[in-house]
């Protein structure tokens, strides 16, 4: 059973992330990444997909040319959970240093 993140634990977890913002109309977080080309953006998405499979936790991924937006939320919990925070950190590790 995955629990929604609330209270002090949620606040701390969000503070420890860089560039991630809460989504206005649902309990989720989002971040945009920028690349030098479509190929670089797509290579990043492929790495994110592999990390997601390893974690058995799956992001929403939106791509337009050289931009990738990632939205994280836990369906099983009905909102943001520790699994999203862990995946957000793992995704940042895959990103160019300017976007970490
Ligand atoms: N990905 N974002 C997200 N949220 C989930 O609840 C989730 C997932 N990937 C796999 C997964 N849950 C499975 O663990 C279960 O649905 C079996």
Image (cartoon, rainbow, N blue to C red):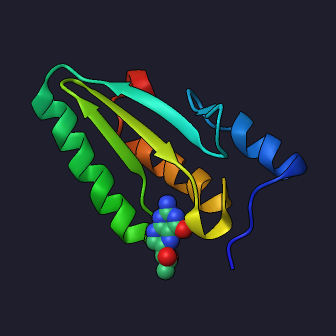
Could you say where residue 9 lies in the image, as x and y percent from the top left? 83, 51
Location of the N terminus (image quadrant): bottom right
What residue is drawn where x is 28% and y is 61%? 50
Residue placed farthest to the right in the image? 8
| Left-right relation of 43 to 59 | left
Front residue (pair 28, 90): 28
| Left-right relation of 55 to 73 | left
What residue is drawn where x is 48% and y is 32%? 31
| Left-right relation of 98 to 23 | left
What residue is drawn where x is 73% and y is 34%? 15
| Left-right relation of 22 to 40 | right
Residue placed farthest to the front in the image? 25
Could you say where residue 74 lies in the image, as x and y percent from the top left? 58, 61
Q: Is residue 43 above or below residue 64?
A: below
Front residue (pair 33, 16): 33
Could you say where residue 54 lies in the image, as x and y percent from the top left? 37, 70
Q: Is residue 15 above or below residue 54?
A: above
What residue is drawn where x is 56% and y is 26%? 19
Residue placed farthest to the left in the image? 39
Front residue (pair 25, 5): 25
Q: Is residue 63 above or below residue 7?
A: above
Q: Quadrant of residue 12?
A: top right
Total numbered labels:
0
């Amino acid at each position: 059973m995955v629990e929604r993140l609330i209270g002090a634990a949620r606040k701390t977890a969000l503070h420890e992330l860089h560039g991630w913002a809460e989504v206005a109309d649902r309990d989720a977080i989002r971040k945009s990444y920028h690349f030098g080309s479509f190929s670089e953006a797509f290579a990043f998405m492929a790495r994110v997909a592999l990390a997601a499979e390893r974690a058995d936790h799956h992001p929403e991924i939106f791509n337009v040319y050289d931009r990738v937006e990632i939205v994280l939320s836990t369906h099983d919990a009905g909102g943001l959970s520790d699994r999203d925070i862990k995946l957000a950190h793992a995704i940042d590790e895959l990103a160019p240093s300017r976007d970490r």
